[in-house]
């Protein structure tokens, strides 16, 4: 069993800027996982955006805190705590923090079968 906390060295060492806007960290990734791509946490400050991009993996964005405007291909939707958005492989997507506090999301990604 592996348990990771956001304050663990293994997580903090993975801190990076994700798609121009979010500060992200990997809880678990291919160094450990067998079939899931990764589990990450990302924080977007107010007014910041995960810029539109396309990934080679299926993803789920799960909002823990804050609010934002989620775009997937030609659709957009307001999201908040408890919302999960499925992003199909190859879909163009972005997320804008349009609120006044940090937007925190979990991201789960899996390679296409």
Image (cartoon, rainbow, N blue to C red):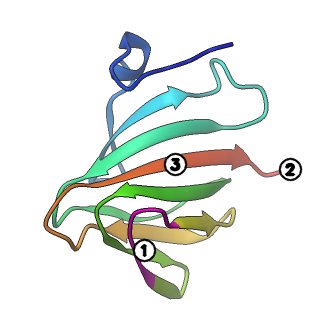
Which residue, given by chain and number where applicable, does mark 3 sit on?
Answer: 107
Q: Position of residue 11 (x, y in %)?
A: 41, 21
**Viewer-proximal residue, 46 or 89?**
46
Q: Which residue extends farthest bottom?
A: 74
Residue at 33% over, 34% down: 16
Residue at 30% over, 69% down: 67
Q: Position of residue 51 (x, y in %)?
A: 35, 64
Which residue, given by chain and number where applicable, does mark 1 sit on?
Answer: 70
- Mark 1 → mark 2, Cα distance in angstroms: 25 Å
When the figure is inspected, residue 106 is found, relative to residue 12, above or below; the finding is below
User: In the drawing, does residue 59 fall left or right of residue 48?
Assistant: right
- Mark 3 → mark 1, Cα distance in angstroms: 13 Å
User: Tag 1, which secondary structure?
Assistant: strand
Q: Position of residue 59 (x, y in %)?
A: 62, 55
User: Tag 3, which secondary structure?
Assistant: strand
Mark 1 Cα shell of 10 Å, populated few (<14), some (14-19), many (≥20): many
Q: Quadrant of residue 36?
A: top right
What range is drawn magenta here? 77-83
Mark 2 Cα shell of 10 Å, populated few (<14), some (14-19), many (≥20): few
């Amino acid at each position: 069993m592996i348990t990771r906390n956001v304050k663990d060295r293994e997580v903090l060492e993975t801190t990076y800027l994700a798609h121009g806007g979010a500060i992200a960290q990997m809880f678990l990734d291919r160094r450990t996982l067998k079939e899931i791509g990764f589990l990450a946490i990302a924080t977007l400050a107010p007014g910041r955006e995960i810029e539109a991009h396309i990934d080679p993996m299926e993803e789920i964005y799960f909002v823990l805190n804050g609010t934002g405007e989620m775009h997937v291909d030609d659709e957009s939707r307001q999201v908040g705590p408890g919302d999960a958005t499925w992003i199909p492989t190859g879909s163009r997507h972005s997320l804008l923090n349009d609120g006044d506090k940090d937007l925190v999301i979990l991201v789960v990604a899996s390679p296409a079968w």
